[in-house]
Amino acid sequence: MSEYIEYNMTDRTIGVVEKKFFTFAEKPGGMVLESGATLSPVTLAYETYGKLDADGSNAVLICHALSGDSHVAGVYSGEDAKPGWWDFMVGPGKGIDTDTYFVICSNIIGSCQGSTGPGSPRPETDEPYALDFPMVTIGDMVNAQKALLDHLGVERLLSVIGGSIGGMQALEWAVRYPEKVASAIALATTTRHSALAIAFNETARQAIMADPNWKKGRYYAGPKPVVGLSVARMIGHITYLSDQSMRLKFGRRLQDKNDFSFNFDGDFQVESYLRYQGGKFVERFDANSFLYITKASDYFDLKKHHGQGSLVKAFSAAKARFLVISFTSDWLYPTFQSREMVKAMKKNGLDVSFCEIKADCGHDAFLLPNERLVQMIKGFIGRAHAEIRK
Amino acid sequence: MSEYIEYNMTDRTIGVVEKKFFTFAEKPGGMVLESGATLSPVTLAYETYGKLDADGSNAVLICHALSGDSHVAGVYSGEDAKPGWWDFMVGPGKGIDTDTYFVICSNIIGSCQGSTGPGSPRPETDEPYALDFPMVTIGDMVNAQKALLDHLGVERLLSVIGGSIGGMQALEWAVRYPEKVASAIALATTTRHSALAIAFNETARQAIMADPNWKKGRYYAGPKPVVGLSVARMIGHITYLSDQSMRLKFGRRLQDKNDFSFNFDGDFQVESYLRYQGGKFVERFDANSFLYITKASDYFDLKKHHGQGSLVKAFSAAKARFLVISFTSDWLYPTFQSREMVKAMKKNGLDVSFCEIKADCGHDAFLLPNERLVQMIKGFIGRAHAEIRK
């Protein structure tokens, strides 16, 4: 049984929003990355909703996951009327209330939705970087977000929130800039990838690199490695669902027919679904960005990079209050990994709330409308807001 | 904690063995497959060990899994001295004792290790069948095995044994030819694939079909789709291992260096391991056979094809005594699926033993030396043998 209930879309949507761009780290110098390489210039695509209070106490940063973007809520003007990826959560009167908070979301560096990534033109040549783009880490993504916040005049975050790779960014924020983070919400995430998670990512990367159109990343002038990227997305998609959700959603139901085709067309609905997901993804995502962002998530290791091998030590500098949420059927980042981080936070005397939400839908649960999740986040940020203004 | 213990190789090996071939279903007519198509001629590569008793009461059929072959035990003469894939289980004095039993194993049809499959020459043209090879089912594999047993003069099996897809064959034997099966051992298997198992297989198939060298299966005269097959094997390999086994085996250990490479070479040991497994597999396996055999396993559905939707009914004709074994960390065919079949067997008043073996190593556990598994199988066949000779 799932705790998911039908989500009632209110008509109080945030309405028309606009994607903006911020460019920094112009030469000389550029942005120094964790690998030691520099990147210049760096552009971030971002959106903001609501207004920053005079006392600067109401800024909420939302961090997106692997394939997300800055478009969290509302709709763009014109034809592209698709609501943002967390529209059920963000808006007037919603979980993250844009009547009360100043909400910011930026596309991560390394991605392909407006921020600087492997598909961006290299200033020296005006050709896309491709694999000459330097490797970026979760720490680098956070540092770029910090530059944006400085630009927007946000000195301290009331809250930083994210799921999956977005959750890694939220955790990184809390330990990297403890003075700047009053609270952090980490959903369906981990402090470091298991060998299983790395194995899935590596297999997906190999699928991309196996596509002859990939051409060591230099495909921007010709056909794209859509077939490899599609297989990579299918691999990813399996890990986002759960055995339960697939059983409920597809079982062994056949596609449009009563018996087997006895050929290699898709017989089962789950086959068609995965093919469709793979095919849809390639229209909107860059294969090289998939390589860079999955690698950044594999590298992420709070224990190693902030705690010299101790997770307790990694959280010793943090000052935020935390809300950690896991989902029962998430086998990519299972609950025990969340409990591990909660334990390490508590050992540092931090104020931590933890909740495991019963859900059939696997890792992707944080992206799906869920009234309980909305109320939990609303309550947590509200309390943090009251605390900060005392 | 695992129940696995170091396996002591005895020096009582089976010694040099020989691969043999049996051809049947010559024209006219040929072998009629479950799809309605016919196949002619059909050749099976097989090996036998031990001798058939005068009363024919000691025949044991071993069925192999996806990438297996007829070479279960012993070594070939000459250079290829690699022992058979279940050498720890089969031999003089071993779990399946070749001093006592007449042991048979044949390569399944659709495979590429000597039996007729998509890479075999089509008699009309002498060109490989490729995708003109008809789809084969687990039932077809069993029917071909039955033709071999008729040829060998085996009227009834003391036992039919298999793990994974081999376990599907063992179950199929017991319900398809109840009079011919005195006992059956089903290891790490299921009566039908879950949506998750189908999803993994389909993604692996898509990886193969995405390789431009695949050429809709017509690659035999040119370069083979080794890259696609390698990715397919990597996907499969993830499902054969377990989160636990990967954690124990690799964790986040880095390959040959103390820190990250900040490029797309393999950083983590698990990455190198998977690449190695993928690369090794393409040397010995045919991509089209991978497509056909995975599809046969997806189609397998004892409930639908023998029970009109009822698993209890599916086992109603069976007369064998059963031993069902699952492994705690097998998430491809989890224990609850074994319990389901045991329940259905028991409802038919069948004599069933069930054991869930504690093992860290995932689905592949049945292939790894395990003294407890050896003793369990030895005891079960011994009792069946005593019973049959009463």
Image: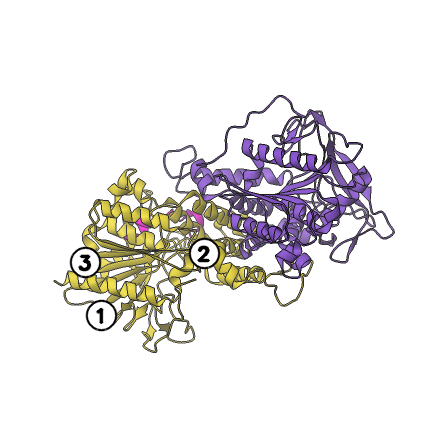
Chain colours: A yellow, B purple
Amino acid, disc 2: Tyr
Q: Mark 1 falls on what kind of element?
A: loop
Label 2, label 3: how far apart the Cα atoms are: 35 Å
Q: Mark 2 falls on what kind of element?
A: helix
Badge 1 sits on which subunit?
A: A
The residue nearer to you, when weighing A23 against B352, is: B352
Badge 1 or badge 2: first in the primary sequence: 1
Label 1, label 3: how far apart the Cα atoms are: 18 Å
The residue nearer to you, when weighing B304 against A312, is: B304
Q: Which residue is mark 3?
A: A155
Mark 2 closeness class: few <14, some 14–19, many ≥20 residues within 10 Å: some
Badge 3 sits on which subunit?
A: A
Q: Quadrant of the C terminus of chain B?
A: top right
Residue at 76% across / 54% down in the picture?
B33
Label 1, label 2: how far apart the Cα atoms are: 32 Å
Where residue A177 sits in the image (x, y, percent)?
22, 50
Amino acid, disc 3: Glu
Q: Which residues are magenta?
A: A129-143
Badge 1 or badge 3: first in the primary sequence: 1
Where residue A295 sits in the image (x, y, percent)?
41, 47
Q: Which residue is mark 2?
A: A240
Where residue B189 sits in the image (x, y, percent)?
59, 47
Displayed quadrant of residue A164? bottom left
Q: Which residue is mark 1?
A: A100
